[in-house]
Image (cartoon, rainbow, N blue to C red):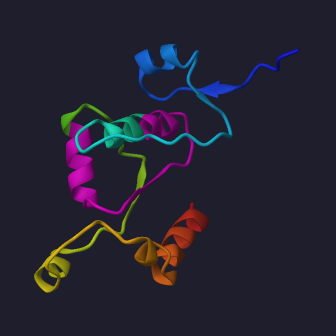
Amino acid sequence: MTQSLSRMSSGVTGLDEILYGGLVVRRSCLVRGGPGSGKTTLGLHFLAVGAALGEKTLFISLEESEERIRHDAEKRGINIEKVEILDISPGSEFFTEVQSYDIFSSAEVEREPIINQIVEKIRSL
């Protein structure tokens, strides 16, 4: 006998239809794709739905500023007013000191200060 799995909306009606009602609750889901394929937009739709339902939501940005994320969401008609954003993207000073940028190496992501920032934000929510 198969057990029915509880699902929640991805924030995108067509995707929810393909997924037979949305994402499976309490399961991880990896979204993969090249630049411009819609990964961030999908994530923002998902968080906007959660925030509208009164859920605590958190977007962690390793690449773009909070201002840019909110601006892009508004341009796409996604209401993320109630979505918390933790912006740990490098500032402009980073680029004046370093010649190349690959977002973060795995060693940098594992560094204690970044992990502490994420953990502190999650605890505060």
Q: Residue at x 56, y 63 (%)?
A: 122
Measured along the vertical axis of the image, is residue 106 above or below residue 40? below
Q: Does the segment drawn in magenta span residue 72? A: yes
**Quarter-of-image position of residue 5:** top right
**Quarter-of-image position of residue 63:** bottom left
> From the viewer's perspective, is 17 left or right of 91?
right
Residue 117 point in image, percent of width and height: 48, 74
Q: Residue at x 13, y 79 (%)?
A: 99
Q: Does the segment drawn in magenta span residue 104? A: no
Residue 110 point in image, percent of width and height: 50, 75
Measured along the vertical axis of the image, is residue 55 above or below residue 92? above
Q: 55 or 68, which lies in front?
A: 68
Q: 28 or 86, which lies in front?
A: 28
Residue 84 point in image, percent of width and height: 43, 55
Q: Which residues are magenta?
A: 46-74
Q: Residue at x 50, y 49 (%)?
A: 57
Residue 93 point in image, percent of width and height: 16, 81
